[in-house]
Image (spheres, grey):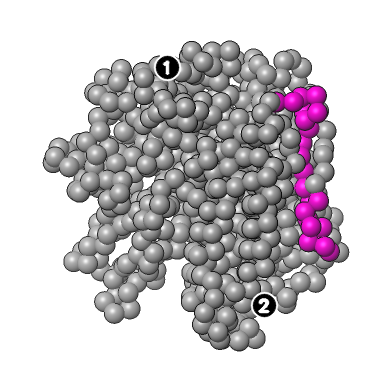
Amino acid sequence: MATKEIKTEIIETDILIIGGGTAGCLAAVEAKEKNPDLKVTILEKAHIDRSGCLAAGMNAINAYLNPGETPESFVKHVRADALGLIREDVVLASAKELNNVVQKVEKWGLPIMKDKNGQYAPRGRWNIKINGESLKPIIAEAAKKAGAEVYNRVIVTNFLINNNRIVGATGFGVRDGKYYIARAKAVIVATGGAAGIYKPNNPGSAHHKMWYPPFNTGAGYAMGIRAGAEMTSFEMRFIALRTKDVISPTGTLALGFGAPQVNAKGEQFMKTKYKHLGGEGAPTPIRVYAPTKEVKEGRGPCYMDTRHLTPEQVKDLKASFLDMYPGIVLYWAANGIDPSKEPVEICGTEPYIMGGHCQAGYWIDPDRSTTLEGLYAAGDVAGGNPYKFVSGCWAEGVIAARSAVDYVAGVERLNAENEESEKERIFAPLHRYKEVKEGVTPSEMEERLQKVMDEYAGGVTVFYEMNDERLEVALKHLKRMKTQAQYLIAENLHDLMLAHEVIDRIDVAEVLVNHLLYRKETRWPGYQTRLDYTERDDFNWLKFVNSKKNTETGEIEMMERPYTQIIPGDRYLPR
Amino acid sequence: MSVIVDLKKCNGCKNKETPLCVKNCPGDLMAIDPENQKAYICKEEDCWDCMVCVKLCPCSAIATKLPYQLALYKATLVPKVYEDKIKWTCTDIDGNKEEFEIKTLEI
């Protein structure tokens, strides 16, 4: 099919939300509540009932101000957990919304567990227990009920731009094959972060047995990078401490069931070697760095010790996982594992780029405006605001929606300069398949990207470690690979989606490696372990590393932004 | 990672515009085979094991199967979805059964 034969669907709206996940659904509700006359449109890659990070469910809310806590005490905790460097203004703004959004979603039907006094049952300082198997359909229903217009199965590929203002987005229907042009007065990008940049823990038939959704492929970052948005802190990668093989969350074991980490010798190494950093409660990067080091130095495997659990507690533990990662219950059944009799083996995951646990993402103001006019960011694509998890993404969606509603009151909808050129770019891999037949498949390119990143940019097989020389090799490979995008072939629309996913991932990887190269210290051991700059260096590096693609030269330009302390106190103490 | 479709049970959701597995798979992996009008997974290795299709299938025709590199033959985990709760039955490789009932919605 020639490009001119592809049908175009034009959408005109007031507020366009890209990604109907955790942040996007709450943004849609807030926008319609604030101004019911506005047209609010969600473009969703999958189907909003079960898309994004919440597809399988969730068993806890991990950013909630339990009694006695305040937005300020939350900022202190998040700052210490991120080793002294966060956007305190941005974190504080969402902290103020956390409890409101949780109570709002509870009203929509989310079961939150209560103690005997009717208070939310805590699961740690910032955590409450929920029965969240249906969390995603609950918030999707709220977005639909609020009157948001939803287009499912539309893969968004780029922003529409008019004179440096973001005026919409383009994409294609992975089911209907149409070219979509969505013109809007304001755009909220809420696509989630990026998995699949690095070689995954498991090979072949299990390559998608990962913690972060493999369908979150960095599109929101890549679109922003290509449009020249300023990005921050990509070098703070997220490496999760997870159960080995099925990569299920360990927070359920540690916070929910008091399981400590032990090495192969039975030593509770967090308590002994990392006591000065908080022991089992040490900052999140340290909790993955420490077992990685134990394994590297010959004291692996490492475990979370669950042998103190009673049979009833094991049953509760399994029930808790069924609300979120049912695969681990099946895995235990398939491998004859009883967590009350043997400890649960753990590992670090392949690195992810995401702003929900760490802080890679758009450089934003507290109102969630990005550096591009008309564009707001919420959820895992928004930077400088780690430790937001589900409820922080909700809060961010709400804040972004309020700002977008205010913004659209004063602007007109504009047509863009790149409406037609994007159509050629999108469908090129389909045409190449039809006309030339041979080339590079998306999975071949993905495999090469993941191998390069794993070996030269600190993947799981090199214990997440890196130095300047290795990173330079990674960059050289990435630059060459970018020129190969023209050879991508797609046999069908699903493969066309995979082709754009790998194009996006390479753009994200290039920015990531530039960030990793720039920060000449080890700020976050594990997430960013430098072999050539092994220490934290507050004197020179207590600042943000940012980047912006020069849209004329295509070069990634690096810049620094100052850190500002708002909440007083020792930046390395959580209280 | 993948799912197995029981071709005897799957009816291709004849009465629905889009079969629920095809409609909801977050990875765009479920499709209907034009030859037999039944569901299949188009790229097995790309499944995330979220079990969305397994839970939503009105014919209970879809089962999750962990890859053999991670899991021995043949444990099963079967959900049954009700309006406000979900019942799970897990059977291990020795045939031991365990059941769970979990709330999903406050109504």
Q: Residue at x 79, y 57 (%)?
A: A555
Q: Chain of mark 1?
A: A
Work out whether residue A85 can be spotted: yes
Q: Label 2 to label 1, Cα distance in Å?
A: 57 Å
Q: Secondary structure at mark 1?
A: loop
Q: Residue at x 30, y 20 (%)?
A: A307
Question: Can you give x and y, in whole percent of width and height, for residue A530 in the image?
Answer: 65, 34
Question: Can you give x and y, in whole percent of width and height, for residue A18 in the image?
Answer: 63, 57
**How would you rate the neighbour count of disc 2 (Cα within 10 Å): few for under 14, some for 14-19, many for 20 or more?**
some
Work out whether residue A392 can be spotted: no
- The residue nearer to you, when weighing A557 against A30, is A557
A555 is within the stretch colored magenta: yes
The amino acid type of the residue labelled 1 equals Gln
The amino acid type of the residue labelled 2 equals Glu
| Vertical arrangement, residue A66 with respect to residue B20, above or below | above
Q: Residue at x 73, y 37 (%)?
A: A519
| Vertical arrangement, residue A176 with respect to residue A114, above or below | below
- The residue nearer to you, when weighing A352 against A515, is A515
Q: Chain of mark 2?
A: A
Identify residue for label 1.
A268
Q: Secondary structure at mark 2?
A: helix
Quarter-of-image position of residue A250: top left
Magenta-highlighted residues: A536-557
Q: Is residue A361 left or right of residue A202?
A: right
Question: Can you give x and y, in whole percent of width and height, for residue B12 in the image?
Answer: 29, 69
Quarter-of-image position of residue B19: bottom left
Q: Residue at x 68, y 53 (%)?
A: A475
| Vertical arrangement, residue B51 with respect to residue A97, above or below | below
Q: Is residue A63 left or right of residue B61?
A: right
Identify residue for label 2.
A424
Mark 2 or mark 1: name the one nearer the start of the chain.
1
